[in-house]
Image (cartoon, rainbow, N blue to C red):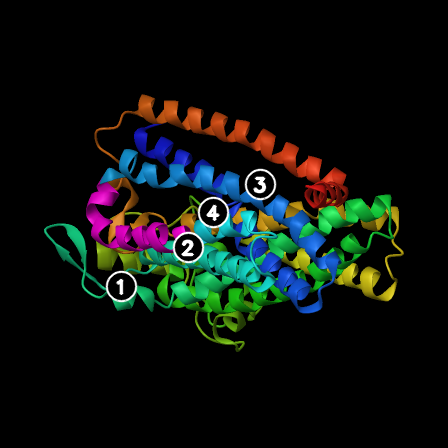
């Protein structure tokens, strides 16, 4: 493979790996803040034990998330220096604000929260975790502001072949940011809910009368239902916005070769990307028009028509993203999200209607459903980025123009192998610690508290 292909593989591997932990950070900080609020409000020690236990799980995730995230920004200089040169005046601003403002806010008050037990008042300690939650989600906003410029460039002009910012406020108010961030935020809520559900059901399978994990399970069910419902609603708005600003991405997601009015939604399609036609397809008439316009008529442009438009607008070239990848990652994301909602409904029935009278089958369903949010997050992110191809900055700067010119294929291959091995090694202690805490349950918390009180 050449430098471009290897650089893309490296960024894909490190980004998807890092994004395994980001949603957990977003959702966990809010969950901890909500649980500790209940502790401060009621004084019930059960909620304190919940905060201490789930806080340990969160800290393991936070550590691995920070470690894997550092590599991301270095790649802009190592593998994508031409992209950094072109858009650095714009792209670097939100990333710098994220590091200097949001991440410092998050990490500073996280330290206060960790070491502030029994040293701060309950309300001051609660304020610390709320500031951690605010900081972590502010970080996400600034990173998504940078990413949204790649999806929908606004507030800039071109000077001597470089993009320079002309309107910082336009970056902040970009429509793409405010459909993307809520989707990512509620995906984090849903991911955290399934993490809590999985550990809780493991403990409840050993002893159904553990009040801490019964309460954790019930909390996670409601938390997850809120998350999945809002992910679906915002995802619908996101799809409608995508049709306006990146119609080729939606056409690829549906393998829609020709423009249609009304447009049918594909349930299952086998297509020929070379000939750009269907081999076999099952479709729902008018459903794609409804997704786009909330009515069962309205034109949705097809791949062939958009390719012709883009050639006229941007010049000769292939402007069609990888259709098979776009089509199947979109369906994996939606399918995993739908399955999550159904599992949560089942969990609600068992927890609230049957009072945890669950079967071995239910235990297995909940336990193995932990994979669902990670599948949805990874495939959703792959779809978001691959569906934009061949552009790094949509309509402005192409992927082949973005890669570093001085870097060799051997150098990129070496670092790709190194990062992949390093990330694999880092996963071992992460899983080990999660498993260790999950098996011990709140017993470790109780031992810690007794030692603390004796001292």
Q: Which residue is mark 3?
A: 60
Q: Residue at x 72, y 48 (%)?
A: 198
Q: Residue furthest left?
A: 160
Would residue 360 appear left or right of 319 to someone viewing this image?
right
Secondary structure state at the residue bearing disc 3: helix
Q: Nearer the viewer, mark 2 or mark 1?
A: 2
Q: CA distance from mark 2 to mark 4?
A: 29 Å
Nearest the camera: 280 or 428? 428
Query: Which quarter of the rendered picture does the N terminus lie within?
Result: top left
Q: State the image coordinates of residue 96 (x, y, percent, origin top left).
A: 30, 51
Q: Is residue 268 magenta?
A: no
Magenta stretch, main secondary structure class: helix
Separation (CA) of disc 3 from disc 1:
38 Å
Rendering coords of residue 299 (x, y %) = 43, 71
Mark 2 highlights which residue? 105
Q: From which residue to which does the magenta span run?
A: 82-105
**Mark 4 or 1, closer to the camera:** 1
Residue bearing the label numbered 4: 382
Identify the residue shown where x is 28% and y is 57%: 310
Task: Give the crowd class for mark 3: few <14, some 14-19, many >=20 residues within 10 Å.
Answer: some
Using the numbered discs, state the Cα–Cα distance from disc 2 to disc 1 in whole angstroms.
28 Å
Marking on residue 154: 1
Vertical order, 213 against 11 (above or below): below
Q: Secondary structure at mark 1?
A: loop
Q: Which x, y percent locates residue 185?
A: 51, 60
Label 4 – label 1 distance at C-alpha: 23 Å
Q: Earlier in the sequence, mark 2 or mark 1?
A: 2
> Which mark is nearer the camera, 2 or 4?
2
Q: Could you tell whether 234 is left or right of 75 in the image?
A: right
């Amino acid at each position: 493979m050449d430098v471009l292909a290897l650089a893309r593989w490296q960024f894909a591997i490190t980004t998807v790996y890092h994004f395994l932990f980001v949603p957990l950070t977003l959702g966990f900080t809010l969950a901890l803040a909500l649980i500790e609020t209940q502790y401060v409000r009621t004084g019930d020690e059960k909620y304190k034990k919940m905060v201490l236990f789930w806080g340990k799980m969160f800290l393991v995730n936070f550590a691995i998330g920070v470690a894997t995230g550092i590599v991301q920004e270095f790649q802009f200089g190592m593998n994508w220096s031409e992209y950094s040169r072109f858009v650095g005046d714009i792209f670097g601003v939100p990333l710098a604000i994220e590091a200097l403002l949001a991440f410092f806010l998050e990490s500073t008050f996280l330290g206060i929260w960790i070491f502030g037990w029994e040293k701060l008042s309950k309300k001051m300690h609660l304020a610390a975790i709320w500031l951690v939650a605010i900081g972590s989600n502010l970080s996400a906003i600034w990173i998504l502001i940078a990413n949204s410029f790649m999806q929908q460039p606004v507030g800039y002009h071109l000077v001597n072949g470089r993009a320079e910012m002309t309107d910082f406020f336009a970056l902040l108010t970009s429509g793409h940011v405010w459909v993307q961030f809520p989707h990512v935020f509620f995906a984090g809520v849903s991911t955290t809910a399934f993490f809590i559900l999985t550990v809780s059901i493991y403990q409840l399978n050993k002893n159904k009368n553990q009040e801490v994990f019964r309460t954790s399970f019930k909390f996670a069910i409601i938390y997850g239902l809120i998350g999945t419902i809002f992910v679906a609603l915002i995802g619908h708005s996101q799809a409608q916005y995508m049709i306006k600003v990146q119609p080729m991405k939606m056409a690829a997601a549906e393998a829609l070769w020709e423009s249609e009015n009304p447009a049918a939604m594909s349930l299952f399609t086998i297509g020929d990307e070379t000939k750009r036609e269907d081999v076999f397809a099952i479709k729902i008439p008018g459903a794609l028009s409804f997704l786009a316009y909330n009515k069962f008529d309205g034109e949705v442009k097809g791949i062939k028509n958009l390719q012709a438009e883009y050639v006229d607008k941007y010049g000769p070239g292939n402007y069609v993203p990888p259709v098979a990848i776009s089509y199947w990652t979109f369906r994996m994301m939606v399918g995993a999200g739908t399955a999550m909602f159904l599992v949560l409904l089942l969990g609600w029935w068992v927890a609230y209607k049957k009072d945890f009278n669950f079967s071995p089958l239910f235990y297995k369903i909940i336990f193995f459903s932990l994979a669902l949010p990670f599948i949805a997050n990874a495939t959703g992110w792959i779809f978001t980025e691959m569906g934009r191809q061949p552009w790094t900055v949509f309509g402005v700067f192409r992927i082949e123009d973005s890669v570093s010119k001085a870097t060799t294929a051997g150098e990129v291959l070496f670092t790709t192998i190194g990062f992949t091995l390093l990330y694999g090694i880092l996963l071992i202690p992460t899983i080990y610690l999660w498993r260790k805490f999950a098996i011990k349950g709140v017993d470790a918390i109780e031992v810690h508290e007794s030692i603390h009180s004796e001292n």
